[in-house]
Image: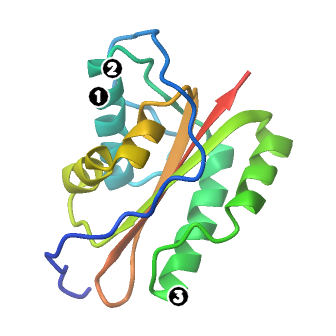
Amino acid sequence: MNNFPFKSAIACLFLFFISCSDSSVETENLNDNGTNSDFEIEIMNLINQHRTNKGLTALNILEIIKSQTDNHTDYMIAKAELSHDDFNVRADYLRTNANATNIAENVANGYTTAQAVVNGWISSNGHRENIEGDFSHFNLTAKQHANGVWYYTNIFIKVQ
C-alpha cells in the first residue's frame, strides 16, 4: 500500500468516563475468535498491560463491540478526519444489544505502531481515564486509509 506518515497524530477527547476500579488480575494475552488482526490484538494487549500495571482488571474482548468500532473507523476514513460523530448511536446500540451500563470511546489517527497509539492515548488525560476506567470489555478497529494514514476506534463498556 502507501507509505506510512511518521507524524504524530491528534487524538480526540473522550466522551464518557467512569472512575478507576481497584481490582487486579494478571496480564494475559487476549484470545480472539479471529475477527481482530494481530495489530489490533497487540494494541489491546498493551492496553491491558497498562491496566494491570495500575492494579486494574484486564478487559475482555466482546465481539458485538467490533461492529461499532469497524463502522466508525470506516466513517472516519471516508471523511479523512477524526470524530466522535454519532457516539450516542453506538452507545445506544451497545446498551440495547450488550447490556452495557458504561461506555467510552477513544479514537486516533496517524500512529503507525501499536505502542505509539497506546502511548498517545495514555498521554492524554481523557483517553487515559477511559483506558483506566471501570469497564469490563472492549474491542478495537485499526484500519488504514488509501493514503496510508491509520485510523483507530476503541470502545470500552461495562457489562453488569
Residue placed most toward the observer, 103 or 123? 123
**Which quarter of the figure has residue 137?**
top right
Tag 2 residue = 52
Give the residue drawn at x 50%, y 30%.
Answer: 133
Q: What amino acid does circle 2 point to?
A: Thr
**Residue 46 shows in this picture:** yes
Image vertical order of residue 7 relative to residue 56, above or below: below
Q: Quadrant of the C terminus?
A: top right
x 77%, y 61%: residue: 89
| Quadrant of image for the N terminus | bottom left
Q: In this view, does 38 lie to the left or right of 101?
A: left
Q: Earlier in the sequence, mark 2 or mark 3?
A: 2
Q: Can residue 35 be seen in this view?
A: no
**Res 79 label:** 3
Spatial CA distance of label 1 from label 2 is: 5 Å
Q: Do the residues labelled 1 and 2 touch (CB within 8 Å)?
A: yes
Q: In this view, does 44 lie to the left or right of 74?
A: left
Q: How crowded is mark 2: few (under 14 residues within 10 Å), some or many (20 or more)?
A: many
**Secondary structure state at the residue bearing disc 1:** helix
The amino acid at mark 3 is Lys
User: Where in the figure is residue 110, as x and y percent of width and height?
Assistant: 28, 73
Q: Position of residue 108 (x, y in %)?
A: 38, 64
Give the secondary structure at mark 3: helix
Give me the C-alpha separation between circle 1 and circle 3: 32 Å
Specify the amino acid type for callout 1: Gln
- Crowdedness of circle 3 by 10 Å Cα count: few (<14), some, many (20+)? few
Question: Which residue does the image show at 51% across and 53% down from the upper left?
Answer: 14
Is residue 2 positioned above or below 140 on the image? below
37 or 119: nearer the viewer: 119
Residue under label 1, please give it: 49
C-alpha gap between disc 2 and disc 3: 35 Å
Say if 141 sits above or below 104 in the image.
below
